[in-house]
Amino acid sequence: MAGYISDAVIRRLPSYYRHLRELEQEGILQISSQELGERMGLTPSQIRQDINTFGGVGRQGFGYQVQALREHIRSTMGLDREHRMVIIGAGRMGQAIANYSHFARDGFITVALFDIDPERIRKGTPELPVYPAEEMEERLPGLQADIGVLVLPADAAQETLELLYRMGIRAVWNFAPVDLHYPRDMAVVNMHLSDTLHILSYQMKHMES
């Protein structure tokens, strides 16, 4: 059973999962820490340390069973059950998130979007409805969502997060360009897109020196 897992290892879990899924698709049944490390750009000792941390089991001289390790990581990340998402903000990015097929493959199902724009609301479909934002409190209980996705202007994000919390949603994926304040029993992941471009700019600058 896995014990405490550091933030650094948690950030690497999706990469492990993706590489192991690709290995399965390639028909590879067994892999060593050396081979997995070469594929992921990590040392064999880092691979072994990470996998021991989250409770994966290998055999010395034989390495890791690809399917068993992938399934273990899948369970560790909570991907062995379905998650229902509501997206607040039905603009281009909100629609792109809702229609990205890989999310559904991993069990993240968008059940509805909310927006204040009448035109966007009219473009909703029975399969992917877009409801008026003022109907959130009324509709959220029936949607049984456990993840809220905020694709909003910064000035609307905090209030919306607090509404989601009151309605029982304890996980938020935040694309609004603001750091939100939230209770300790809530999980929030911020996706500040400009931050990633700034990091890329830094890396480009220091490649030149």
Image (spheres, rainbow, N blue to C red):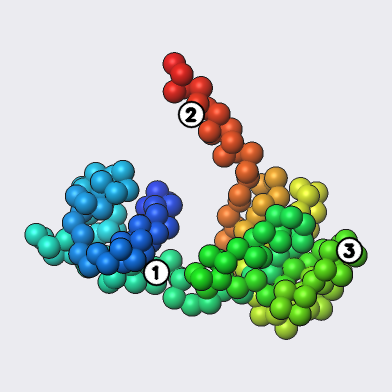
Amino acid under disc 3: Glu
Residue at point 68% right, 75% down?
A: 111
Q: Which is more N-terminal, label 3 or label 1?
A: 1
Q: In the image, which disc is placed on residue 74? A: 1
Seen from the viewer's position, the closer of residues 67 and 58 is: 67
Residue that label 3 marks: 119
Residue 160 locus on image (x, y percent): 76, 61
- Compared to residue 112, the image places residue 161 above or below, namely above
The C terminus - image quarter: top left
Residue 129 image point, x, y percent: 77, 74
Mark 1 / mark 2, whichever is N-terminal: 1
User: Marks 1 and 3, how far apart in space?
Assistant: 39 Å
Q: Residue at x 34, y 71 (%)?
A: 71
Residue at the (53%, 65%) spot, across then down: 102
Q: Position of residue 85 (x, y in %)?
A: 64, 70
Task: Give above or below for 129 relative to 6.
Answer: below
Give the mark, 3 or 2, whose residue is nearer the N terminus: 3
Count neighbours of disc 1 (C-alpha within 10 A) and say few if under 14, some if 14 to 19, many if 20 or more. some
Residue 203 is labelled as: 2
Outermost residue, front direction? 26
